[in-house]
Amino acid sequence: MISTRWMISVLLVGLTIFQLTTASDLQRTLNFPDTNRGKTINRGQNSRNKVCRKWYGIRDRILRDVFQGQCGDAARAAVRLAFHDAGTFSQMRQRRGQKNGGADGSMLWDLQEVLRPENNGLQNIVTALRPLPREYGVSNADILHVAGILAVIICPGGPPIETWIGRRDIGVRNPDGMIPDVNDSVEKMLARFADMGLSVRDTMALVGAHSTAKQRFVDPSQAGKSMDSTVDIWDVKFYGETLNSTTPDGVFKFASDVKFSQHRLSARQFKRFVDEQDDWDDDYADAHERMSLLGQDRRRMTRCTEILPPKIDLGPLFIDKDGDNGADSEDERQFSPKDAFSLRVDRGRLRTVLRRLRGYWGYSG
């Protein structure tokens, strides 16, 4: 099977050669296999893990009733909720034996925590998820963080993240003032992430979740603007567009993201993910997994990644600026290296794949 990483590598190699020779000398025939074909939905009928078995129903409830099978406002709120819950963890407070935060689900049971200013906009997703722990007999923490993982993979291009079950509800309100602010200095933000146990590279991978984010409260006059030009696709356009001195129509850039992209402490790791979808997928999935376990003991938990829906690969959906297909199953097309700058997702093909792989949870397209 040819991976997206292989495809991008070929594009970049071709681009380098293109700089040295003429376009007419550089026509290449590339085969972009349809890696979405043949994928099916695991409905749990044959699951042998009794811990995971009940989570198929919970998965379906979240994907169908909360997300409506799509990468929309509820899904993007669930990703943000996962960070705002886990992001209150502090290694320093843990060493000192102080009241600590973490991936403990307190945002679902503490009616005051969700009202903090940094949690504006999370009230609706909290209301949607709050009944589920009692209904299914599971912890608030597991519901909240499984929802955050499902919210990533429901988006086209979103990677599968190792999914663990067995978090304990700590029953203590998370400490205040632990979530970095968009106007903080890079030094302050990175120090806070380091106190969570996350490296600069982890942090730059995690901020890429802004690929499917919208801002509402940093600048209310521009509420609803997205953070990149493909808000419903989990891709790396966020990185390149943040670095670009111009801003696409309808896009809003957080000051923190711009600073991350330029600062000596973070710029190299931020730029690592420009046009590197597979590298970002791998790093993001790893960082999100560890974030979802902050303050918890994984040795006491059960791996239930099997419940995740299939990932929607972006590679087979690419077309170039002239509308030529990037994937024709087993067919091939002529390709010029300059296309590396113009590839985009064919919306018609995407809708077809979404209806097949997300229609079970309500996507109608």
Image (spheres, helix red, strand yellow):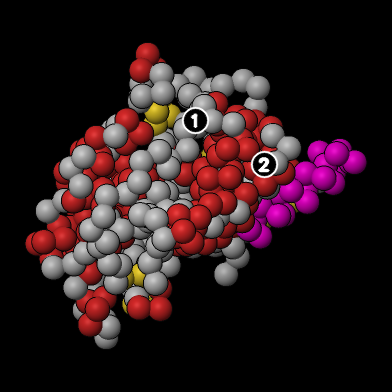
Determine the residue positioned at 38% across, 67% down. 296
**Frontmost residue, 61 versus 83:** 83
Q: Is 3 part of what is drawn in magenta?
A: no
Residue, disc 2: 266
Q: Determine the residue located farthest toward the bottom in the rendered image.
A: 48
Q: Kindly identify the residue that appears in the image at 36 percent across and 41 percent down.
A: 176
Quarter containing the C terminus: top left
Q: Gap in Å between the C-alphas at discs 2 and 1? A: 15 Å
Q: Quadrant of residue 307?
A: bottom left
* Residue ID at (53%, 48%): 193
Read off the residue under disc 1. 182
What secondary structure is found at the residue carrying circle 2? Answer: loop
Q: Can you give x and y, in whole percent of width and height, for residue 86 in the image? A: 39, 53
Residue 93: x %, y % from top left: 45, 55
Which range of residues does the magenta coloring cover? 5-25
Q: Is residue 77 left or right of residue 278?
A: left
| Residue at screen point 47% across, 33% down | 181
Disc 2 to disc 1: CB gap under 8 Å: no
Q: Is residue 24 magenta?
A: yes
Amino acid type at circle 1 is Val
User: Where residue 352 sits: x, y (%)?
Assistant: 35, 49
